[in-house]
Image (cartoon, rainbow, N blue to C red):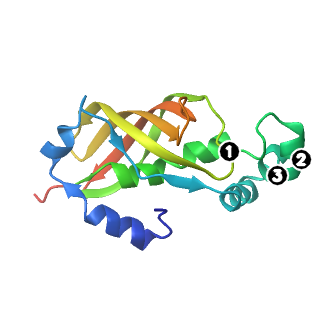
Amino acid sequence: MALNSVAETEALLAGRMVPLADYRAHLEGEPLFSPWLTVDQTMIDRFALATHDHQFIHVDPERAKAETPFGGTIAHGFLTLSLLSTLAYEAIPGVEGTRMGMNYGFDKVRFLNPVKAGARVRGRFRMVALTERAVSLQTGWDVAVEIEGAIKPALVADWITLTVMTPPES
């Protein structure tokens, strides 16, 4: 499922909020997986428009088929990376009392396998670090974007997220 609006994202998260202790239990636990998401040519074309990256390997199916080893167009690596947010929304429970979540950064990102137009991908998230502060949580994730039917993932990364909590009432 693709999340297409703020309302859809907030509704999904509202139904999946857990106490901090339950969130903490994911530390060094089993990976969490998102549902599969199709990366179609329309998604790739829209990303090209937004980023002004119109390289033919992304937006010209006939030329990409004729001139590349991919057999057609492929998604931008940064498109694949940017899908982590929506894949995470669908895989990782939110923490009760969350005010907002945001990217804190990446310690490593590697693009290992191109995502061909029409392929389905999913996120695999394994919590590897959790730092609790007064009004925030910093979470480290070992992440991969897997391609359905492929042995090698599209990308792997060490991702750090920041969850800002609603301050406790004094």
Between 38 and 168, the one lying in front of the other is 38
- Which mark is first along the chain, 1 or 2? 2
Give the numbered dot on residue 63. Answer: 2
- The answer to whether one can see residue 51 in this image is yes
**Residue marked by disc 1:** 116
Name which residue type carries label 1.
Lys
The residue located at (35%, 67%) in the rendering is: 10
Between 83 and 50, the one lying in front of the other is 83
Side (left or right) of 57 relative to 167: right
Side (left or right) of 3 relative to 33: right
Give the secondary structure at mark 3: helix
Name which residue type carries label 2.
Arg
Say if mark 2 contacts mark 1, CB within 8 Å: no
**Residue 67, quarter of the rendered image:** top right
Q: Position of residue 16 (x, y in %)?
A: 25, 59
Say if mark 2 contacts mark 3, CB within 8 Å: yes
